[in-house]
Image (cartoon, rainbow, N blue to C red):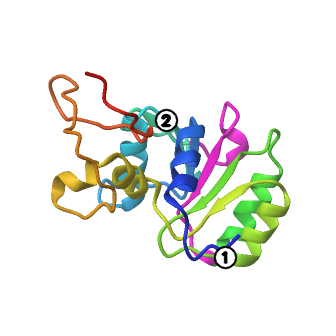
């Protein structure tokens, strides 16, 4: 697969299929991007497991850190990697040791390792590199447009009121509006 560009349909299908996400390299520091990502994804209904051996057992934003992928107490659908590109092969080794295998290996912005991607795809995993699931979810749902960012997603529909508090949109494709 070409990892220079991904179709919106591919990203949307992955984010729609997965329910359980392990975030390797997650941080308990509220100023770190991985903190925002784990908080955001958990608020969107995903079951998120932050993976960081130095934080194992600690709970942040209602999520308990585990030391390694094998310590996640349920099957993992997606592994999101917040580690430098040279660490991706070792993370992939840990992923490939899991049973059942996750469906998706996702690496964060600035993280690309084509050899690891080829190995993952050969093992049957879908791969996304150099992208952020938080940003992609926000872009595809239209949430990111609320701040004036061009989401490249056009819709004439107004966001639905979801009750009090912060509105959250779904990435589910929008069908025709019934009258």
Is residue 81 covered in magenta? yes
Magenta segment: 66-85
145 drawn magenta: no
Q: Are marks 2 and 1 in contact (CB under 8 Å)?
A: no
- Quick one: label 1, few (<14), some, or many (20+) residues within 10 Å? some
Q: CA distance from mark 2 to mark 1?
A: 26 Å
Label 2 environment density (alpha carbons within 10 Å; few <14, some 14–19, many ≥20): some
Q: Is residue 116 visible?
A: yes
Classify the position of the N terminus by image quarter: bottom right
Along the polypeptide, which appears first: circle 2 or circle 1?
Answer: 2
**Residue 153 quadrant:** bottom left
Q: Which residue is disc 2 drawn over? A: 46
Residue at 42 percent of width and 37 percent of height: 42
Image check: 172 left or right of 142?
right
Q: Which mark is residue 113?
A: 1
Q: In terms of depth relative to the viewer, which is nearer, 28 or 178?
A: 178
Quarter of the image where one finds residue 62: top left
Q: Position of residue 7 (x, y in %)?
A: 54, 62
Say which quarter of the image contains residue 111: bottom right
Residue at 29%, 54% in the rendered image:
154
Q: Is residue 148 above or below residue 64?
A: below
Residue at 73% across / 43% down in the picture? 70
**Could you say where residue 56 lies in the image, as x and y percent from the top left?**
55, 44
Q: Main secondary structure of the magenta part?
A: loop
Using the image, tell me which numbered label, if any, was put on residue 124.
none
Relative to 44, say whether 133 is above or below: below
Decide if residue 28 is in sight here: no
Residue at 49%, 57% in the rendered image: 8
Q: Across the whole image, how many numbered discs are drawn on residues?
A: 2
**Element carrying mark 1:** loop
């Amino acid at each position: 697969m070409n990892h220079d560009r991904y179709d919106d349909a591919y990203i949307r299908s992955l984010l729609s299929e997965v329910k359980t996400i392990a975030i390797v390299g997650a941080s308990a520091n509220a100023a770190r991007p991985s903190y925002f990502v784990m908080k955001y994804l958990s608020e969107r209904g995903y079951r998120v497991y932050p993976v960081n051996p130095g934080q194992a057992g600690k709970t942040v934003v209602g999520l308990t850190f585990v030391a390694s992928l094998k310590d996640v107490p349920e099957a993992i659908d997606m592994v999101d990697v917040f580690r430098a590109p040279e660490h991706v092969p070792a993370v992939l080794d840990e992923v490939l040791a899991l049973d059942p295998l996750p469906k998706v290996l996702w690496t964060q912005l600035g993280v690309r390792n084509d050899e690891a991607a080829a190995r993952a795809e050969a093992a049957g995993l879908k791969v996304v590199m150099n992208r952020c699931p938080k940003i992609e979810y926000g872009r595809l749902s239209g949430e990111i447009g609320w701040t004036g960012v061009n989401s490249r997603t056009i819709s004439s529909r107004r966001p639905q009121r979801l009750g009090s508090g912060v509105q959250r949109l779904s990435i589910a494709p929008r069908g025709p509006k019934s009258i």
